Amino acid sequence: MGKNRYLINIIFILFVLISVFAIYSDISNITKKISNISQVDIKFNKILLLREIIQELQRERGLTNIYYSKKVEKTFQLLQKQRATMQDLLSHSNNEQLIKEINTLRLRINKNTITASETFDSYTKLILNMLIETKKLLLFTTDQGIKNHLLIYQKTNFVQEYLGQLRAEIGSILETRGINHKQYLSIIKLQTLVNNYILQTKENILLTKVVVTSPIKKKCFRETNILIEQIVHQELQQINISSIEWFNLSTCAIDSIATTMTEYLQHVKEEIDRKLLEKKSKLYFHIVFWVLAILISLLLSLILYKTNRKMLTKQKLLEDYKKAIDNSTIVSKTDKRGIITYANQAFCNISGYTVEELIGKPHNIVRDPSVPKEAFSELWSTIKSGKTWSEQLSNRAKDKSTYWVNATISPIYDNDNNLVEYIAIRHDITEIIELSKEIKSTQYELIYRMGESVESRSKESGHHIQRVAHYSKLLAQYYGLSNQEAETIFIASTMHDMGKIAIPDSILLKKAKLSNDEWEIMKTHSAIGYKILAGSNLPILKMAANIAYEHHEHYNGAGYPRSIKGEEISICARIVMIADVFDALISERVYKKAWPLEEVINLFKKEKGEQFDPKLTDLFLDNMDSFIKIKEEFED
C-alpha cells in the first residue's frame, strides 16, 4: 500500500508540474504577443501625433519665411493663426523640451534677434529631429507587414519635409523677386529628392496591395512642379503668382500627400487593431481551456484523495503507535491542547490513577510542583515546533509521592502534515534517581567531613569551614551561577586547604611568624591539595581540585603557586578566595585578633582588582549584611 501511495504521489506531482509548465508557456507566449502589439499600438499613436506636429510645423516655417521676406500684415495674421493651431497640437504631445524650443524660437522671431536664414535652419532642425525620432519608433515592431507600412510612412514624411523646404525657399524668392546661387542649388537638390521619394513611395504602396481611395491631387502637383521648373530655368520674371498664392498652392500639394497618407495609415491602424483583437481572443480561449482543464484535474484529484485518505491516515497512525509501544513501557497520548486522550496500564500503575481519572484531564495532573515552569515552557516550545523533547522529569503520583521518568514526547502528524496529537513514552527511573541521590549525598558528606578534619588539625576556628562554604554559596548565587553550581561550590569549598594535611605540625601549628623557608613550605599546600584531589571524574572533586590549587592566586597575578591572573583563575577559586580571606580576617585565630569590620571592608576596597576579582568584590561589599548574618549564625 505504501508503494502505491508513493507512486500516486509521484504521478500527481509530475502531472501538476507538466500542467503548470504547459499553462505558463502557452499563456506567456500569447501575453507576450499581445504586449508587443499593444506597444505597437501605443507607438503608432505617437507616430500619428508626431506626423501632425511635423506637418503643422512645416506650415509655420513656410509662413515665417514669407513673413521675413516682406513683413505684410496679412502674412502675420496667417502666421499667428498657424501658431495657435500648432500650440494646440503641442499641448497633447507632453514633450516639454519641444514646446520650450519652439517658444524660444518664436520669442526670438518676435524680437527680431534672429535672421531669416537662422530661422529657417532652426525650424528645419526641429523638424528633422522629429523625423529622426519617428525613424527610431519604426524599430519597435518585429511584424514585417507593419514595418513595411511604416517605412512607406517614413518616406512620405521626407517627401512632405522636402516639399515644405521648397515651399519656404520659393516663398522667400517670390517675396523678394530675386534668387541667389545658394537658393538655386538648394531648389534643384530638394526637387530631386522629392521626385525620388515620390517614385519609391508609389512602388512600395503597390507592393502592399492597400487600396487608397483618396489619390494625390495631380493639379496641385502639376502646377507646383511647373513653378519649380520655371525657377530652375531662371524664368522668375514669367511667374505671375504671389508668395501667399504659392504658399497655398504648395500647401495644397503637401496636404494632398498628407490626406492620402492619413487614409493609408488608417489601414495600418485597422491592421494593428485586428491583430490585437485576434491575439486577445486567442488568449481568452486558452484561459477558458486551461481553467476547465484545471477544474477537471482538481475534481479527479479530490476523488482520488478522498478514496485513499482514510486508509493512508489509519495506516500511518497504526505504524506510529506500534513503534511507540514496542519501544516503551509507559505510554500516553494527548490532543493539541495537552488533554490526555489515551493512557496505558503502565501509566496507571506508576501514577496511581485509573484510566477514567486520566482521560480528559490535562497532563499536569501528574505535574511535580518542584519542577520549574520554565522546564514545561521549553517542553511545549519544542514539541510545538515539530521537534521531539527528551528529558528526565519528576512527576507526582495520586498519593503525592514523587516518581522519576525518562520521558520522550513527540508530535504526531497526518499525511497532510497537520498536527494530530502528541505521544509520550516514559521509562521509570525512580530507583536509579534515588540511588544517585543517596550516592551523591554520601559523597558530599564524606568530602565535608574530610574538609573539617583538615581544618581541625590546623587548629582553625570551629566553624571556619561552614562559614566559608556558606559565604561561597551565597556569593556564587549573587554572581548568577545556577543553584546546582552554587551547591557544588558549597561542598567543594570545604576542601580548599586539603593540602595542609602534608604540612609539618611544626610549621602548621606555629604561633609565631613563619620564617621565609617555612613560608615557602606552607605555600606548597595548594599544589599538594590539587594533586590529592585531581584525577577524579566526579564534578565536585574536579571543582575541589581547582579551588585547592587556585584559591591563593591573585587577580593581578601576584599570587601563588602559578601566578596566574584575571579570568585564568577559575570562578569557583575566585569566589572561595574572597570567602576564605574574609573569614580569616573577621575571625579570631590563635595567632591574631579579629579585625574590625571597617578595616576588613577597607582592605577589600583597596585590593579590588588587585588580589580580588573586581566584580565579585562589588557584589560582596554591596551585600555585606547577608555575609555578616552567616558569620553570626555560625559563631565559634
Image (cartoon, rainbow, N blue to C red):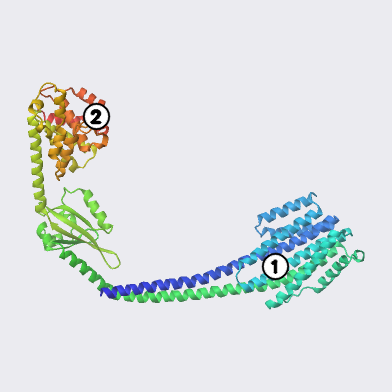
Tell me the residue that label 1 is attached to: 154
Q: Report helix, strand or loop for mark 1.
A: helix
Local crowd size for mark 1, using a 10 Å CA cut-off: few (<14), some (14–19), many (≥20): many
Q: Is label 2 in contact with label 1 (beta carbons under 8 Å)?
A: no
Residue farthest to the front, as pictured = 517
Q: Which amino acid does label 2 sit on?
A: Ala
Q: Who comes first in sequence, dot 2 or dot 1? A: 1
* Figure check: 122 above or below 467: below
Horizontal and vertical percent position of residue 527: 16, 35
The quadrant in which residue 152 appears is: bottom right
Q: Please name the residue shown 9% across and 59% down the image.
A: 349
Look at the numbered disc 2 and give the secondary structure of its residue: loop
Image coords of residue 397 (percent x, y): 11, 54
Instruction: Residue 413: give x, y in percent of width and height.
Output: 26, 64
Residue at position x 79%, y 65% in the image: 190
Asked if residue 469 can be seen in this view, the reply is no
In depth, the one of 45 and 179 nearer the eye is 179
Residue 99 at least partly seen: yes
On-image quarter of the C terminus: top left
Residue found 55% across the figure and 71% down from its top: 33
Q: Name the residue beneath numbered marker 2.
A: 558
Q: Is residue 95 left or right of residue 124?
A: left
Foreground residue among 437 and 409: 437
Q: Where 49 falls versus 440 (above or below)?
A: below
Nearer the observer, 372 or 78: 372
Q: Residues within 10 Å of mark 2 (few under 14, many from 20)?
A: some
Mark-to-mark CA distance, 2 and 1? 97 Å
Q: Quadrant of residue 148?
A: bottom right
Above or below for 106 versus 467: below
Between circles 2 and 1, the one closer to the viewer is 2
